[in-house]
Amino acid sequence: MKKHALGLVVSIIAVSFASIFILSCEAPPLSIAFYRLLFTTLLLVPLLLVRNKTRDEIRLLPKKTVLIMILIGVVLAAHFSLWITSLKMTSVASSVILVTAHPILVAPVSFFFLKEKLSVVNAFGITISLAGVGVLVFGNYGFVTLGLDSLEGNILALLGGIAAGLYILGGRMLRRKISTLTYAFIVYSVGTISLFIICLALSAPVYNLSISDYTIILFMAIISGIFGHTLYNWSLGYIRASVMSVALLGEPIGSSLLAYAIPWIHQEPSIYTIVGGGIILLGIYLTARTMKSADGVENI
């Protein structure tokens, strides 16, 4: 079980760099989202070509399972579209904290559909998290009008978090019976196609980006895509959804510190982001930390 926990830790560190890569690009947010997922998908192709077992698994997948993965791919595209756009409109700290608040959704849904017990502490954590969201979003919007945070950006991040929660729940259910490579390739491919359509519909460029942007997005695909999301998907098959969600608390902390420390970004969070974010993180911790599966067995 240790290797699964190690994989989760590495994935959290890797995804923490995503916001830094994104803010280092000059390309429009939707273009970044499209190429990030496209490059990540292409990086999986060589593995697919040398693994006959994976190709056989894809060919023999039930239609219902394929349909569910298609829906998850669309949800992933929505997550990237909303979150990456939010990063261009609000601070890294606010965006990543709000997009990581999906345990507020994951916990109740896991209770009803995955039979993971929801305690009084979990319910209290959800309430605290919602209060923290109010402080962060409306505090920044109402009192720091010249700051980094905007109401639109925070709302997009929160919606991106809802999409992330649905993505995690779907992955948790399917990864119990489908290999990581099969799951990731199909979901990423559908997400890439969905983002391509979104880019065309909203007139976001899908070619002729700068060489530096292509390079940055490629590094993001390798680090945050392969070692981040894909390794995270692998861990989903061994660690329950609520634990996976609370483990992601490391991402907003890491991303916020990086955004503050890196000279060309250097974002200092407002007092409302620090206070509200701290309340949200505490609430997320309480939401997920004591949840157990129906048989009472902890999986990490």
Image: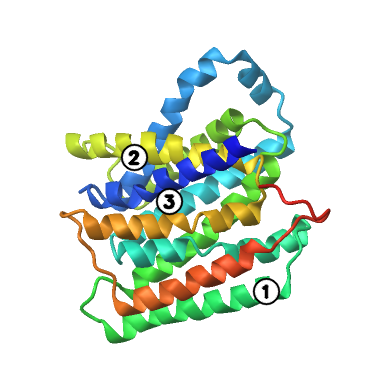
Determine the CA span between mark 3 and mark 1.
31 Å
User: Which residue bears the numbered disc 2?
Assistant: 220
> Residue 233, how many percent across, how many down?
56, 40
Quarter of the figure that contains the N terminus: top right
Amino acid on which the number 1 mark rests in the picture: Val
Amino acid on which the number 2 mark rests in the picture: Met
Q: In which quarter of the image is residue 225?
A: top left
Determine the CA span between mark 1 and mark 2.
37 Å
Q: Quadrant of residue 97?
A: bottom left
In this image, 239 relative to 118: left or right? left
Q: Do the residues labelled 1 and 2 touch (CB within 8 Å)?
A: no
Q: How many marks?
A: 3
Element type at mark 3: helix
Q: Is residue 14 above or below residue 84?
A: above
Q: Say which mark, if any, is on residue 121.
A: 1
Can residue 210 be seen in the rendering of this structure? no
Q: Is residue 188 above or below residue 56?
A: below
- Classed neighbour count for the residue bearing mark 1: other residues with Cα under 10 Å, few (<14), some (14–19), many (≥20): some
Can residue 236 be seen in the rendering of this structure? yes
Determine the CA span between mark 2 and mark 3.
13 Å
Q: Please identify, in this view, whether the residue under mark 2 or under mark 3 is nearer the observer.
A: 2
Frontmost residue, 43 versus 252: 252
Q: Are marks 3 and 1 in contact (CB under 8 Å)?
A: no
> Residue 144, how many percent across, how many down?
26, 82
> Residue 130, how many percent across, how many down?
53, 77
Q: Give the mark nearer the N terminus: 1 vs 2.
A: 1
Residue in the picture at 83% in, 53% down: 295
Element type at mark 2: helix
Residue in the picture at 26% in, 39% down: 216
Q: Say which mark, if any, is on residue 80.
A: 3
Q: Give the mark nearer the N terminus: 2 vs 3.
A: 3
Q: Give the mark nearer the N terminus: 3 vs 1.
A: 3
